[in-house]
Image (cartoon, rainbow, N blue to C red):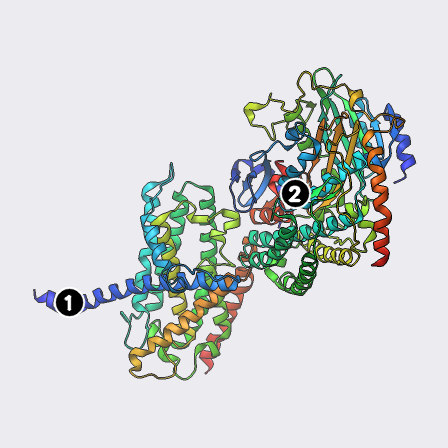
Amino acid sequence: MAMDVETLEDSRHHRYVLNMGPQHPSTHGVLRILLELEGEYAMELLPVLGYGHRCHEKIAEHKPVKSFMPNTARMDYLGALIYNHGYAHLLEKAAGVEVPERAEYIRVITSELNRIQSHLLWYGAYLLDLGAFTPIMYAFDDREHILDILEDVTGSRLTYCYFRVGGVSKDIDDKFVTSTRAFIKRLRSRFPMYEDLVNGNIILQKRLNDVGELTPQLCARYGVTGPLLRGTGVDYDMRRAEPYSIYPQFDFEIPTETKGDCMASFLVRFREMEQSLRIIEQALDGLPEGPVMAAKVPKKLKIPAGDYNASVEAPRGELSYYLVSDGSDVPYRLKVRTPSYSNLSVVPEMCQGMLLSDVVSAMGALDLVIPEIDR
Amino acid sequence: MDINQVKKQWQTLSTTIEDIDYAVSGHDYNICLERDKVRDFATLMLEEGFYLVDLMAVHVTPAIEVVYQFAHFETRCRVLARAFVDDNSEIATIADIYQGANWHEREARDLHGVVFVDHPYLFPLILAEEDVDLKPLLKKEGTLKDIDAVRRKPPEPAPEPKTKVKPEGAEAKPEAAKSQEQS
Amino acid sequence: MEIFYSILPDLIRMVVCAVCGAAIVFGNALVMGYAERKLAGHIMLRPGPMEVGFHGVYQLVVDGLKLMGKQLVVPKNADRPLFMLAPLLAFAPVFVPLLVIPFSDKIQGFDLDIGLLVILALASINLLAILIGGWSSNNKYSLFGAFRAVSQNVAYEIPMLLSLLSIIFMTNTFSLKGVVAAQSPVWFIVIQPLAFLIYLVAIVAETNRAPFDLPEAESELTAGFHTEYAGMSFSLFVLGEYANMFIVCSVATVFFLGGSSGIPLPYFEYSGIIWFLLKVYLLMFFLIWIRWTYPRTRFDQLMNFCWKYLIPFSLVNLIITVVMVKLL
């Protein structure tokens, strides 16, 4: 429920400022938002960033390109493998390294598992924002299986550094394949339960419908991508729009909704999980034998002078790495375009005139990962 | 979107338009702009339905270069536009055309000290208020490179790693294809 | 001295009642605290407290000790006297309504003719405590919580009263014992199902529990009106909340579920309390269950629901009841 901004324009002296964050349960990290409130209506919003900035771009300019890989995982703790993927993709493109096909398959499988894991956590945390305490535990129950599967192969549970320039660090085994197949079956059987909660719960529907509406034009002006954009009816997905890795080989849909509100992005994320499962299934079926690492990747990887860009689809939208190289093995400039950064910048316009509760649910729909913004 | 139509309009604004190989660089077009054409260019891009991917600064000589990246929702068309700032590190803002540029410009201001003229709220975004003049991403003496050093070289003298690695990749390929047939 | 001897029985009765009331308040808080955490755990696929004692039964005792040992922090620029008064005000009035509740035929503090009015009047003081606590905390979130609590509780008191009033019209008495006695053949939940439903919804809002826990909506207002409270002052709010839950559920039992009536047990005039408590805790279980199941409503939706649905329906229900009583 939004209030007309004009009708309240003359009552400015009634307003007061509420400081939401940097430590607030629903900002999901050290994000601070200054709200200028009129009663409970947020008339102006001013996000304040930078509380946890780790200067990754500065670090990148001081070490060899290959050793920046672990840093990429720290930017988005939920989509670490996809961040790995983007960076490996960038360097392979720039240095002309060919990746063995098996490695690409493994990358796709693990990346998609990572995407599902991210969406599951978002599901739980979003409903927590809306005041339902229980779903997060159900989501974590499923997510735990993915973490166990990925831990076996990558060695870590959250900030993976599994991909290398030219392949992956370790081959997967039969246990990985069987447990992934078991997990696909399990998650498929759980979807009806998750769906019932969305479609059957009137409180949730009333909280999400018509809240935080976006349009494709607004998304273009702010650079909003990912499930939010697909919720407005634009089927823009990096895996399809600018195919990378071996995604063109797989048969999957890009889910879209038309309304662009919180409910639309909610449903889009749900159906994305299903599509990710489909991709994993196809990749497991077509998994080729062979090496998982390109032979003889130079230890000191020199990138030819010039600028390079690689974009991948992170769980929250388009992730771009832009590398300016001067011909040495240390980047001259590395810029990471993180999806949450652009997605959050739409908040002051999207949430203007909203109730405080709606601000919380609209921000939850953005699926913010603050380390990605304060990278 | 008709790309030839758009290209014609670009030509009226920009100094050079370079078609570049997407497979190598990840961009389709590389456009060098005069700094006073930046706003016209952004307006044009918005009309054509491009969205702003990113905006950032690169510190090179002769001046800091501001790099704009655009892409399109419907067709693959990744555009890289660049412009140099003037002697006072100033360049026109595009934050009123692409509102998403607001934060990117504030970030560029924090990290490189680029002043975007007429920006609605050029307040430090990432840095603390007292560190406005820190400019952490400016290169030091000695590490600062000329613009030509970071531009792509013409492809004749093929870059070293490319030739070294390619045969291995070529070897791996038939093997992988075989196993795919089996499955 | 003469006068002293004449009032001595009443005095003793008062002391006994006060002790029993305190025992109920604290005992109920222990039971509910444990039950809530354990049930929430099982609803969430986890075991809940397990460490202290068998299945964590002593957890609440340990937590109570911890809370008592904590420092009472008064925020800077807070209104200190009011800040300290609020938790006491939330906690103290809950003893009085317990005196008039007929736990069984013989177990009742005082059978007042205005029993219901005493309960409703004193239950509203809790709201005052929330308002004072939110106001004096010098915190915008607290203030928000207090605002929400006031408008919500004032609104939901109306359907609650109206639904109880339709019972009062049928029984012609405010005495709780009289209401229980009037249900001897059939409980009022059968005759007045709509009033029961309305009352049930209203008490969820009245006790500030999810899905209507807007005064303490933690994802919006951090902790709402008790954001700044710590240690014992916080736990007094919680004690008050659980005692209030007990009281409103007792009222529901008295008015709709036949009070202590049930399958006769030996010494039924005393042992009826077993049935009474069973019904009360069944209702409390229901409150816990929905708290851990549903998301929170939005504030305007909550108020709309009250003014557009609950109040008209309870009014219609009241009018029909009055007409029926007059006709029959």
Q: Is residue C244 left or right of residue A7?
A: left
Classify mark 1: helix, strand or loop: helix
Frontmost residue, B47 versus A30: A30
- Residue C159 visible, this angle: no
The chain holding disc 1 is C
Q: Is residue B59 above or below residue C204?
A: above
Disc 2 crowd rating (10 Å Cα; few below 14, some 14-19, many 20+) is many
Q: Is residue A375 above or below residue A150?
A: above
Residue at numbered disc 1: C7
At horizontal 66% and vertical 41% (from top left) the residue drawn is: A340
**Residue C315 place in picture, x, y as percent:** 50, 68
Location of residue A72 by image quarter = top right
Frontmost residue, C60 versus A282: A282
At horizontal 66% and vertical 55% (from top left) the residue drawn is: A209
> The C terminus of chain A lies in which quarter of the figure?
top right
Q: Is residue A19 left or right of residue B134?
A: left
At horizontal 33% and vertical 68% (from top left) the residue drawn is: C115
| Residue projecting furthest to the left | C1
Location of residue B55 by image quarter = top right
Q: CA distance from mark 1 to mark 2?
A: 81 Å
Disc 1 crowd rating (10 Å Cα; few below 14, some 14-19, many 20+) is few
**Residue A39 place in picture, x, y as percent:** 53, 44
**Residue B58 place in picture, x, y as percent:** 72, 25
Residue at numbered disc 2: A161
- Residue A44 visible, this angle: yes
Classify mark 2: helix, strand or loop: loop
Please state which amino acid type lies under the numbered disc 1.
Ile
**Residue C188 place in picture, x, y as percent:** 44, 77
The chain holding disc 2 is A
